[in-house]
Amino acid sequence: MNSIYQEIGGEAAVDAAVAIFYKKILKDKRINNFFKDIDMKQQIAKQKSFLTMLFGGPSEYTGKDLRAGHSHLVKRGLNSDHFEAVIEHLTSTLEDLKVPNKIIEQIITTASSAKNDVLGI
Ligand code: HEM
């Protein structure tokens, strides 16, 4: 069976999603503070690995890395409200790209399963 990554168009789809997702996150005052000090290049690479991972594409990240990768943000107050805000933007990005609802649901399920690692719970 194809992964979601292949099904929605591989790297090209991820690139399209990154541009939209990134804008939504940076506009959102609830969470943009966490992204403030990060340079553009790193940010885009981060967003790409974020989405590739969620779409089941090639990614070197594991749950343990996600925990380590966000622990400094947990120290700065990252909590489940922030997590839900990111999920909101992810959902609306996928809707903007006309990804079928069934696939959106699968992606959101995968994203939600990373919650404890991201929040260091
Ligand atoms: C399903 C949820 C999430 C996934 C899969 C995810 C994925 C990732 C990945 C793969 C990285 C790169 C780690 C590295 O190599 O350094 C990263 C970094 C980052 N994430 Fe997330 N993330 C999630 C949720 C969040 C949330 C909720 C926030 C904040 C509201 C957030 C903010 C950041 C920031 C600011 C960085 C960059 C950290 C730095 O470079 O200092 N992430 N994330």
Image (cartoon, rainbow, N blue to C red):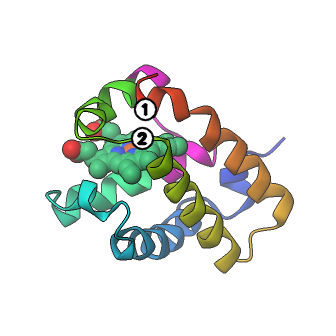
Residue 72 spot, x, y in % from top left: 22, 34
Residue 117 spot, x, y in % from top left: 47, 26
Q: Is residue 59 visible?
A: yes
Q: Residue at x 66, y 64 (%)?
A: 9
Kind of residue at badge 1: Leu
Q: Residue at x 79, y 46 (%)?
A: 2
Assign ligand 1 to one image quadrant.
Answer: top left
Q: Nearer the viewer, mark 1 or mark 2?
A: 2
Q: Is residue 39 magenta?
A: no
Q: Is residue 62 visible?
A: no
- Look at mark 1 in the image and give the residue it sits on: 119
Gap in angstroms between the C-alphas marked 1 and 2: 6 Å
Residue 73 spot, x, y in % from top left: 27, 39
Task: Decide: is 98 above or below 105.
Answer: below
Asked if the residue at tag 2 contacts the one at tag 1, i.e. Cβ–Cβ closer than 8 Å, the answer is yes
Image quadrant containing the N terminus:
top right
Q: Magenta stretch? A: 51-64
Q: Mark 1: give few (<14), some (14-19) or many (20+) Cα within 10 Å.
A: many
Left or right for 13, reference 8:
left
The answer to whether the beta carbon of the residue marked 1 is less than 8 Å from any atom of ligand 1 is yes
Left or right for 79, reference 7:
left
Secondary structure of residue under mark 2: loop
Q: Residue at x 15, y 61 (%)?
A: 39
Towards the viewer: 57 or 72:
72
Task: Decide: is 56 above or below 5.
Answer: above
Q: Is residue 58 magenta?
A: yes
Image quadrant where residue 102 sits: bottom right
- Look at mark 2 in the image and give the residue it sits on: 79
Kind of residue at badge 2: Asn
